[in-house]
Image (cartoon, rainbow, N blue to C red):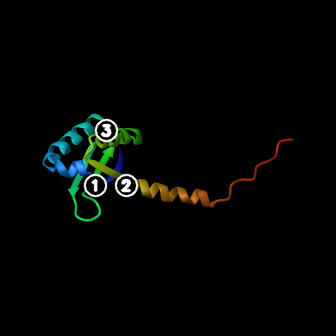
Amino acid sequence: MNTYIALMNLTEQGVKTMKDSLSRSDRGRALMKRLGGRIKDYYMTMGEYDFVVVFECPSDEAMAQFLLAVGAWGAIRSNTLKAFTKPQYTRILKGLAALEKPAPARRRKR
């Protein structure tokens, strides 16, 4: 499962319909479940973003579908980050060693 972090802001419409926020959140959870993922953590925040949401989703395509569908509801805009778990990060770092070795010289065909 891939991990994504969405930094979300309410649109003007989202602020006007804030009382519907919890039902939109439930609707979002149901949609994510239909796409094979889940909302792992959900926070209302103070500062630059109104909400921070952590998702687990099976693919970039499924996550993009979710974000486009929820964005079409008109209440939020998001900046979404793909996150890497510690085991994934470890594999990425181990792969760097192979990149540090010079590539073998290629022989020219005549």
Mark 2 falls on what kind of element? Answer: loop
What residue is disc 1 on? Answer: 9
Number of marks present in the image shown: 3
Residue 55's x, y, as percent?
30, 48
Residue 100's x, y, as percent?
61, 61
Give the amino acid at mark 3.
Ala
**Residue at 37% in and 55% down:** 85
Check the image and name the residue furthest to the top: 34
Residue 85 marker: 2
Check the image and name the residue furthest to the right: 110
Residue 51's x, y, as percent?
25, 56
Give the amino acid at mark 1.
Asn
What residue is disc 3 on? Answer: 69
Give the amino acid at mark 2.
Thr
Residue 73's x, y, as percent?
26, 40
Q: Quadrant of the C terminus?
A: top right
